[in-house]
Image: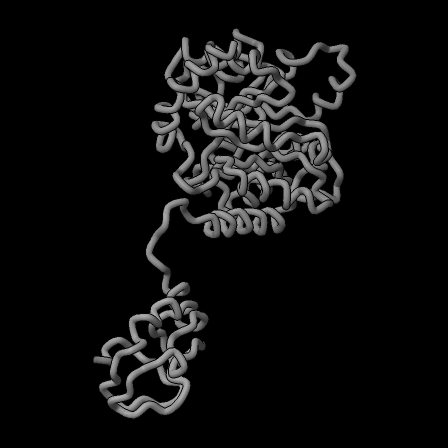
Amino acid sequence: MTDVVTRDAERASAAAEEAQGRHGSTRPGQVSIIAEMACSHEGDPALARAIIDGAGRAGADAMQFQIWSLADMVVPHHPDYQKLTGLELSRAQWTDLASYVRDRYPAMQIIACVYERASADFCERIGVDAYKIHSADLSNPWLVRHVARSGKRIDLSIGASTLDEIQTALEWIRAASPSTIWLMYGFQDFPTRAEDLQLEYMRNLKQLFGLPVGYQDHSDAEHGAAWWLPAAAVGMGIDILEKHLTDDRSRKGVDHEAALNPDEFVRFVGMIREIEAAKGQAAPKPFSPAELRYRRYAKKSLVASRPLAAGTRLTEADLVFMRADRLGLPPDQAGRLVGRMTKRKIETYHVIQEEDVA
């Protein structure tokens, strides 16, 4: 399996570069933020619109819908069947919600998490931008291949999955189409405990498969981990963040444990953008205006330790190293001045520049 993964990583490195501009893929230096609605809408389109508004106003890059047909997804005797019946939205309602996103927030993509082929076909009719395949279907070639044939980006959830399962799903996708692929790490243990995550493993997946990797956060939204774990993931170089969003977490409805309220989501997006700005770039770059101001303020310069008349031959005792009113020669350049003659009168504590000596 190792040879296959290595070969796939080499092939995927070029694909990852291509992924920087197709189907809403990650932009260099910027994390793509996905607002996950899941079932927080409680089967009510009005609540779904409120959640969409929360994502749009916060500036999320994408709104993620879970679109499914209960009759095709869960057996009738499943213990959650009746609850899911109350959460299912009709095709007409999903069509209206997709139109709502495009009319109100045209810059925000629509990602559809689908669980069966009929829903994938419906999502093609309403023109979603990308698909998410849940980790439950990672080993489902009938769905994976069907979705891949759309040619659209696939966000492949890989929580609680083996490397072999991930590799096999990637091969199914690539055999069916040239779809861009994002690997999405995280698992739906609501709420997920910090000690159950493996962020180092998540980062290693990026290197192993040569693909953009995202973090799906399901931390308890009432605790700080819901903020600092995504922040840590961004600091570790992940490309995508998926974060649950609801209209009002106090209702304690379905999929609310890890969901932020709209006002919190605004702050969350702002936090991520600040982290991005602070990360900067790996290569050295010219000093910013703020850095130049800091250098002028903080760096020490060579100044006169006493009044110096014109014609004074400088010794080390004539020089001290201090913060001055302007930036002069740094202390390590003192040797350029010692032994030379001053061309003008220099007051105590005034900067001595090389043009002041002969």
Q: Tell which of 289 and 50 is nearer to you.
A: 289
Q: Tell which of 286 and 356 is nearer to you.
A: 356
Q: Tell which of 111 and 30 is nearer to you.
A: 30
Q: Is residue 242 left or right of residue 31?
A: right
Q: Quadrant of residue 344?
A: bottom left
In the rendered image, residue 193, in percent from the top left (x then y), is placed at 73, 34
Number of marks in the image?
0
Q: Is residue 189 above or below residue 221?
A: above
| Residue 163 visible in the displayed image | yes
Q: How is the image coloured?
A: one colour
In the rendered image, residue 206, in percent from the top left (x then y), is placed at 49, 27
Q: Tell which of 287 and 224 is nearer to you.
A: 287
Q: Which residue sits at x=54%, y=44%?
A: 53
In the rendered image, residue 166, in percent from the top left (x then y), is placed at 54, 16
Q: Is residue 39 left or right of residue 61?
A: right
Q: Which residue sits at x=36%, y=77%?
A: 326
| Residue 100 visible in the displayed image | no
User: Farthest residue toward the right?
Assistant: 79
Q: Quadrant of residue 165?
A: top right
In the rendered image, residue 358, in percent from the top left (x then y), is placed at 21, 80
Q: Is residue 256 left or right of residue 97?
A: right
Q: Is residue 249 left or right of residue 354?
A: right
Q: Which residue sits at x=71%, y=32%?
A: 192
Q: Is residue 169 above or below residue 316?
A: above
Q: Which residue sits at x=48%, y=26%?
A: 207
